[in-house]
Image: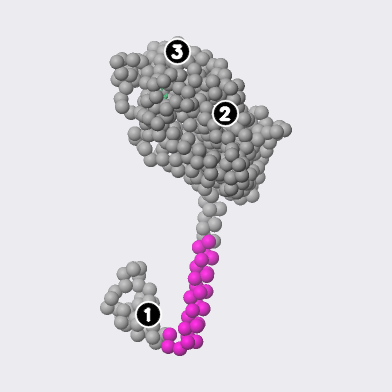
Amino acid sequence: MPSLEDELFPSTPGKFKVDRAHNMNRQFHRCFASTSTMFLWALFLIALTASYLSFQSFVDSGSRYFSASWGGIQWEKQVRNSAQIHRSGGMSVLVTGAAGFVGTHVSLALKKRGDGVVGLDNFNNYYDPSLKKARKSLLNSHGILVVEGDLNDAKLLAKLFDVVAFTHVMHLAAQAGVRYAMENPNSYVHSNIAGLVTLLEICKSANPQPAVVWASSSSVYGLNEKVPFSEADRTDQPASLYAATKKAGEEITHTYNHIYGLSITGLRFFTVYGPWGRPDMAYFSFTRNILQGKPITIYRGKNRVDLARDFTYIDDIVKGCLGSLDTSGKSTGSGGKKKGNAPYRIFNLGNTSPVKVPELVNILERHLKVKAKRNIVDMPGNGDVPFTHANISLAQREFGYKPTTDLQTGLKKFVRWYLSYYGYNNRKGLQ
Ligand SMILES: O=C(O)[C@H]1O[C@H](OP(=O)(O)OP(=O)(O)OC[C@H]2O[C@@H](n3ccc(=O)[nH]c3=O)[C@H](O)[C@@H]2O)[C@H](O)[C@@H](O)[C@H]1O
């Protein structure tokens, strides 16, 4: 015999048995025979619902505080300390992707000149997370807190803005890499599109709104053949999904500038290299392989033409980032309402002197004092473009951007760092 409880609350929700309906009707009639009984039942159900809801909210907030790596009075104090400004007229900057290559260098430079910096990074495993952790330790040793969290975590972003009224956001978190987009396209949508929108939503609602400076990419020029690349050139022919998401970012940021009055500066970085760099990039993986005695693959373009890049040294990029922050102007809106037009700017940050990839290898060989085993193959159709070359006159005019490090000098500094970090025989660098 099924119990009354079984009849009222079947164990498989949604699977009410039709042949029991008649029985249930009769029991309901008996239960609710009088008005007073109905009233008591109603009270009982309301009390049950209320206690269920309050229990749920306790579980929700409890689990956030107990399991998340952020939140709490101590954490807020650390965030505030890290954001503290130590120079007059300084800024408090939220740096996303702070444990990344460019993020680390920019954070250190800001902190050194007395600005407040709070880092955010999700420490994903696109490349060796231990390198990101080492960068984080470096930042910590300079008094910079790096909060572990994803751009798509709107609650965390909102909390950070609750705790600190950031004047600027330096948005460098992204899924980088041109060729990896063929392996994991969704990671580009997750970080470069969805994450960007989440961040901009928080920025537009913040009061005061911060000015946003963010990393676009030279790859937006795609199949553009006019050289050198100027900001006004075509960018509607991307050659990779990576480039397409960066181009989309330029359009998305434009809408937030237009609708909400956010000050926006997009920086088109040209193949940035240097100490603490990204292991997925050619100069880094070539170094690793050359030292290990492994062959390197050098791509060659159509008609056996060598590929070339406008390789740009990290210190020059850092100067460009700081110059952009210093001249960003103010967002005009507050709490999601636009109060007037705000700046919308895009700048190339390149070196203005492209170098062919085989020449990059020659330089590495000289610095490493080891001959590379070259394997030259035709460029696969994987999103690469044959060359990049920046026209930087706009950034020069706006904030005096002037790159000063050539590839020979920059790679010497990189190799010195590489050997000190990994050593010749350290397995960490030889994966
Ligand atoms: O400016 C950008 O916006 C981008 O710069 C960087 O992309 P790229 O310019 O493609 O740099 P990178 O991979 O170092 O390849 C350099 C050269 O070596 C060639 N290359 C590469 C690998 C290889 O095995 N062989 C080879 O010949 C390759 O064909 C190319 O000619 C960033 O990674 C990217 O995130 C984005 O920021």
Residue at numbered disc 3: 363
Crowding at dot 3, Cα within 10 Å, few <14 / some 14-19 / many 20+, comes out as some
Identify the residue under disc 2. 321
The structure residue drawn at horizontal position 51% and vertical position 60%, both measured from the top left corner, is 59
Residue denoted by label 1: 4
Q: Magenta region: which residues?
A: 32-57
Q: Is residue 327 above or below residue 367?
A: below
Q: Nearer the viewer, mark 1 or mark 2?
A: 2
Give coordinates of residue 74: x percent, y percent: 64, 47
- Using the rendered image of the protein, determine whether residue 396 is visible from the camera's viewpoint: yes
Name, please, the residue furthest toward the bottom. Answer: 34
Which colour scheme appears in the figure? one colour
Report the amino acid beneath label 1: Leu
Q: Which comes before the other along the chain, label 1 or label 2?
A: 1
- Mark 3 residue CB less than 8 A from any atom of ligand 1: no
The residue nearer to you, when weighing 67 against 336, is: 336
Would residue 196 be found to the left or right of residue 244 on screen?
right
Select label 1 or label 3 by which is in front. 3
* Residue shown at the point (50%, 68%) measured from the top left: 52
Q: Residue flagged by tag 3: what amino acid is it?
A: Ile
- Which of discs 2 and 3 lies nearer the camera? The answer is 2
**Which residue type carries mark 2?**
Cys
Q: Earlier in the sequence, mark 2 or mark 3?
A: 2
Measured in 3D between alpha carbons, the distance from the residue under mark 1 to the one under mark 3, in whole angstroms, is: 83 Å
Camera sees residue 82: no
